[in-house]
Amino acid sequence: MEEELERTAQALYALPFDEFVAARTAAAKDAAASNKTLAQAIRTLPKPSVAAWTINMLAHHNPDAVQRLRTLGQTMQEAQASLDAAALRELAKERRKLLGTAVGEARLAAEKQGRKISGAVATEVEATLRAATADLAAGAAIESGLLLRGLSADGVDQVDVSDAVAVPSALGKLPPPLPRPSGTQRPSGEVPKGRRREPTAATAPPAQRTRTQIRKAGARTDSDADAVEPEKPRLHAVRTAPRPVTPSLLEKAQAALAEAEEAAAEAADEAARRARAQEEAAAAFVQLTADVNEARQRLRALELSLDAARKDRETAAAEAKQYARAAEKSERSAVLAKERVLRLRNTPD
């Protein structure tokens, strides 16, 4: 059933945004005739957010863009694991270019499916695509074309993809994450975060010591204590002496610097984009203001022309009435003159 559900979901999540609900209802109805369990699973498929839908359009209609990001992300993770700061800087520049191109292609894919993407949605799309370069699971979720919500990566923790994919089995079996860089392993004596260190016979308060610890503590002889006591100052000096900077720590610092430079460059790019957008908005505002003023002037001129035309019409109407009355008067005079001529003809000399 999982394979049938995934095939149906792939078809549904490739549709235009506004057609999803109706298509999901129709698909569940068709499946109900043969498999009610499958029909119920189809019926409960969530509608994606606009940002997730936009990325699904990119995954379905331009999968190469998503694959390029995943490949770059794998390369960046390998560079991070080997603490190659120079490679990380170059890859960060390439990622900025690829992200800009991918966001533009996602916008285009969404517009071809009948929906224009706002700036806020485009920002969420970019953050989600960036997560694909930082985490294998995030990349698989995006490439599946079944994304339900946006993703984000902080560069430290794994990206949370729980409830992010309509059919989780579509993610398949992910490869294991790359090993940590050298020098980041936890020292053998360090207690993992969240786990309590068990007290020893020497450190535990008397009330908390177990019988075994008490017996072990009592088994020490005075000679043992005398043998350990002279070494305490030397141990203290060793413990408090400054540790030299090892090459692995230096490489780790260089990698951290590369990441910081990348973040700063991305922030600068974002600030430049926002500044350009502000300049374009200001220019558009000035142009629209000029257009409005020009339109108002034209409207005023048209209103004056309309008033003049109205007066000309009224004048012409008055003159027409005068001419009509004059014509009527002339016609009456002609009739009277004709009658007089007839009377004169009929009068004997």
Image: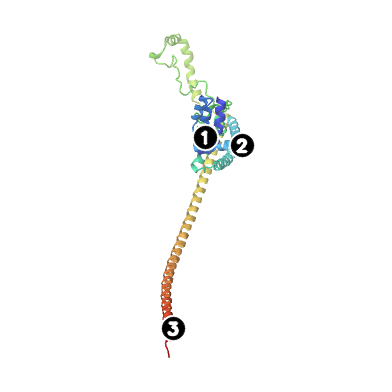
Residue visible at 49% across and 23% down?
239
In the image, 221 versus 266, the foreground residue is 266
Q: Who is closer to the viewer here, 144 or 155?
A: 144
**Tag in front: 2 or 3:** 3
Q: Position of residue 332 (x, y in %)?
A: 41, 78
Q: What is the quadrant of residue 107 in the picture?
A: top right
Report x, y in % for residue 17.
51, 38
Look at the picture and state if 167 lies above or below 209. Answer: below
Q: Position of residue 55 (x, y in %)?
A: 54, 37
Judged from the image, the secondary structure of the residue bearing numbered disc 2 is: helix
In the rendered image, residue 198, in percent from the top left (x then y), is placed at 45, 17
For the residue carrying disc 3, how many other residues have a C-alpha within 10 Å: few (<14), some (14-19), or many (20+)? few
Of residues 65 and 347, the one drawn nearer to the viewer in this rendering? 347
Give the residue pinned by disc 1: 23
Element assignment for label 1:
helix
**Image quadrant of residue 330?**
bottom left
What amino acid is labelled 2 in the image?
A: Asp
What's the amino acid at mark 3? Leu
